[in-house]
Image (cartoon, rainbow, N blue to C red):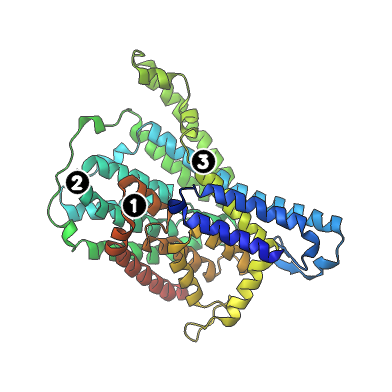
Amino acid sequence: MGTIIILVFVLGYLAITLEHSIKIDKLIPALVMMAICWALIALGIDSFPQWFDSGKHSLLENFGLLGHEEKMHMMEETLLHHLGKTAEILVFLLGAMTIVEIIDYFDGFSTIKSYIKTKKKSKILWIFAFLAFMLSAIIDNLTATIVLISILQKIIKERDVRVWYAGLIIIAANAGGAWSPIGDVTTTMLWIGKKVTTGHLIGYLFVPSLLCMLVPTFIASFLPAFKGNLETVEDDSDKPKSKYSATMLYLGLAGIVSVPVFKTITHLPPYVGMMLALGIVAIFAEIYSSSKFSITSHDSDESDAHAHHSPVHHSLSKIEMPSILFFLGILMAVAALESLGILFGFASSLQDTMPMLGTELHHAGVSDLVVLLLGVGSAVIDNVPLVAASLGMFSEPIDNELWHFIAYSAGTGGSMLIIGSAAGVVAMGMEKIDFFWYLKKIAWLALVGFIVGAAAFMITRTLF
C-alpha cells in the first residue's frame, strides 16, 4: 500500500510540473493527490508497520501492535494536526493577499511609480532590482513581481526591453523573499513551523540574499540590453486614482511588517497578527472609501460599482484562491508521506549515502551538497513541496543552520528556470516570456547569484 501511495504522489507531482503541457491547472492534481493518498492510508491502515508522530517528531515503532480503532484514532489525530498546521499558513496568506489587494484598490502602488524619474536603462535596472529585493521581503516575492511588472508596463513601451527587466526582477524578488519570514511561502512555512526565528533568519540570510541580487544585477548592467536611455510612456491616467493612495500603501505595508513583531511580543501564531493587521487596514479602507465616494458623482458605472460594496469585499474577491487550494493540496499530500515515515526514512538513507562536502559535518549530519541540490531541484520542481518534505525529513532544532540554508536554497534556486518559482511563473504569464529565452539569457545570471550567495552563507554562518 505504501508503494501505491508513493506512486500516486509521483504521478500527481508529474501532473503539477507538466501543468502547461497538459492544460490542467496544478491545483487539480494537488487536491486529487491529497485526497487519494489519505484515502489509501485510511483503507490500508492495518498494513502499515510504523507511524510518524509529528508532535514528537519521531517514529512510533509499536504502531503495528495497536488495534484497528486505535490506529484510526491516531490517523485522525495526525490528519487534524497537519490540517491545523496547513491552515495556519493558508490563513496567513489570505490575510497578506487581502491587504495587498486593498492597497491596490486605492491604487497605492502607483506611488512607487512616481519615484522613478530617470530614463537611463542601467539606473532603472538598479531601482527595480532594489525595489524588488525590499518589496518582496515585505509583501512576498509573488506580489512584488506582479506590482513591479505592472509598473514596468506603464513606463516602458517596448516589450523586448521589458522582458530583460522582468528577468532581473524575478532574481531580485526571489532573493529578497528568502531573508524575510513573510517574503516567500517556503520561508513562511519554516517560520510558522517553528524552524526559524525572524532575528536569526535575517542575520543568517540578509547578506547572502543581498549578494544573490547584487551580483547578477551588476553583471547585467554591463549587458547591451541595459545600455542607453529609455523612451518612457507619459500618461496622465497613470496618476493615483485616490488621494489616499500613498496613505494606504504605507499603512498596508506597515501592517504586514508588524506581524513578526506581534509574534515576538505575544508568542501567538503569525496568522493572528496578520488578522489584526488586516482588521486595522480594513477599518481605514472603509473610512477612506466612504470619504472617496461621498464626494464622487454617481453617474459613472465605475462609481456605482464601487459604491455598493466595501473595499474589503472587493479585495477578497480578487485574491488568488487557486494558489491557496494548491498549497492545501500539496502540503496535505506531503503530510501523508510524512505520517507513514517515508520522508523520515528517505532522510536517514540520504544522510548515510550522500558524500560530505568538505571535512566539516554539521550538527544536522547533512552535507551542504544535499541542500544545494535542493536549491537546484527547486528550479525544476515547485519549492513548496520540497520544503514541506524537508520539514518531515529532518528533526534539527529551531534556528539550526540547516533550516536557514534550506530557506536560502529553496527561495533563490528557483530563479534558475522561469517555471522554478511563483514569481517566474507570474512574470511568464504577464510578459509572455519564452522558457528557452529565459534559459539562455537569464538563467546563468541566476546561477551565478545563487552560487555567490551560497558561498557567502557558508562563510557567515560561522559568525552565529
Question: Which residue occupies the foreground of this view, 389 or 250?
Answer: 389
What's the mark number on residue 132?
1
* Quadrant of the drawing holding the N terminus: bottom right
Q: Indicate which label's residue lies in the foreground, 1 or 3.
A: 3
The span from disc 3 to disc 2 (Cα, nearest Å) is: 32 Å
Q: Are marks 1 and 3 in contact (CB under 8 Å)?
A: no
Q: Secondary structure at mark 2?
A: loop
Res. 179 in view: no
What's the mark number on residue 404?
none
Res. 162 in view: yes
Name the residue type under label 1.
Answer: Ala
Which residue is rendered at x = 32% and y = 63% of the image? 439
According to the picture, the residue beneath numbered tag 2 turns out to be 158
Q: Secondary structure at mark 3?
A: helix
Above or below, comparing residue 361 to residue 58 in the picture: below
Name the residue type under label 3.
Answer: Met
In the rendered image, residue 372, in percent from the top left (x then y), is placed at 46, 72
Name the residue type under label 2.
Answer: Glu
Q: Secondary structure at mark 1?
A: helix
In the rendered image, residue 32, in percent from the top left (x then y), is placed at 61, 50
